Structures are given as structure tokens and as C-alpha cells.
Amino acid sequence: MKPSNRSSWSLSLVVLAVATLAVGCTASRREAYIQDKARQHVYRKPIAEVWPQVRSLLKEKELPVREAPGAYEISTDWHQVGAPSSLGTSYVRYLVRGKQPNPTMCSVEILKQNRVESGQGPMSSNGQRQDLGTDTTNMTRDVEMEWELLQRVDPEGAKALREEAEKSIK
């Protein structure tokens, strides 16, 4: 290959890499925008119409649920995520709350808590394995699951939100 061909080939690869990175960054910003809007979403339906979809979503994810009687609140038991390993075993549980500010509108908040039960740690100086213990994180909003619920309950609203993200973030 002639030196000029190598230069143009190298330049083409750099341009392709930059374009790929830009597209990836744009897609990531769009997803963040959509998730932020999903977190703030208010359904224009009573909670009684939305709640069966919440139950269905959790059931499809094979999460064992406990529903608070007389309230729109569901908690799940700890559910193992992935296979156990010597590095630790991961678990997750959810708390879902439905809020109804008026009879024709509602919102749903999905909180997620992760836990890792660590495996046996490194050898100590006396030849015994150290137990690494359990690490539990605080509860955080699971905006990905909230977006999934929004797409189920209000597909037209979800489509409009995605289009808004496409137009807003280029």
C-alpha cells in the first residue's frame, strides 16, 4: 500500500470511529431523556386501570410479590440475579407505589434495591479465608422498568415521548 493510501485509510477509520462514538453518545442522551420523562410521567388514567399492568409486569419478571391490602403498594422478596459465583451472589427486590392525586390521574414509582452476598475473601495471615459479608445498596428508582410500564400502559404516550427525544436530541 502506498503511503497516501495508508493516510486516507487511517483518516477514514478515524472518521468512522468519531461518527460511531457520536451516534452512541446521542443514543445514550436520548435514553437518559426518555428515562427522565418516564420518571415524571403522570398517567391520564385512574390507578385502578394501571395497577393490573404493574402486577403483570412483575409477574412476567418472575418476581414473588406481596401486595399491601387496601393500598397501591407491592413489594417483592429478594430475587437472585444471575448465577452465584465465588465472587458473590447478586439479589434484587422492588417496592412499587401507586399514587393518585385525583380520580383521573396517577403515577407509579418503582424502587429497586440490590444486594450482593460476597463469597469467601482472600486468605488472611493465619491461613483462614476472610468472609467478605453482605453489601446492600440504598433503594433507587428503576427508570428502565418505569419506562417499560409506560410503554405497556400508554403506548401512544411512549411513542410521542420517543419522537420528542428524537427531535430534541440530535
Image (spheres, rainbow, N blue to C red):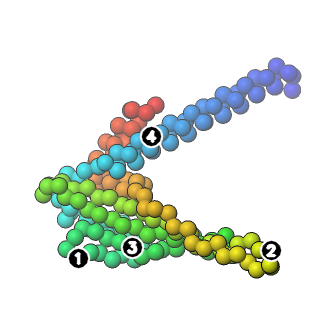
- Amino acid type at image mark 4: Arg
Q: Earlier in the sequence, mark 1 or mark 2?
A: 1
In this rendering, which labeled residue sits more in front, label 2 or label 4? 2
- Horizontal and vertical percent position of residue 70: 19, 74
Which mark is on residue 30? 4
Helix, strand or loop for disc 1:
loop
Q: Earlier in the sequence, mark 2 or mark 3?
A: 3
Helix, strand or loop for disc 2:
loop
Q: How far apart are marks 2 and 3 (CA)?
A: 41 Å
Task: Give whichever of 27, 101 is nearer the camera.
Answer: 101
Which mark is on residue 76? 3
- Horizontal and vertical percent position of residue 81: 53, 70
- Amino acid type at image mark 2: Ser
Are the residues at dot 4 and dot 1 in contact (C-beta closer than 8 Å)? no
Are the residues at dot 4 and dot 3 in contact (C-beta closer than 8 Å)? no
Q: In this view, does 2 lie to the left or right of 30?
A: right
Which mark is on residue 69? 1
Q: Distance between the residues labelled 2 and 4?
A: 51 Å
Q: In this view, does 28 lie to the left or right of 5?
A: left
Q: Residue 37 occupies which quadrant of the picture?
A: top left
Quarter placement of the N terminus: top right
Q: Name the residue under label 2.
A: 125
Helix, strand or loop for disc 3:
strand
Q: Does any portion of residue 83 appear in the rendered image?
A: no
- Horizontal and vertical percent position of residue 86: 68, 74
- Amino acid type at image mark 3: Thr
Are the residues at dot 2 and dot 4 in contact (C-beta closer than 8 Å)? no
Are the residues at dot 1 and dot 2 in contact (C-beta closer than 8 Å)? no
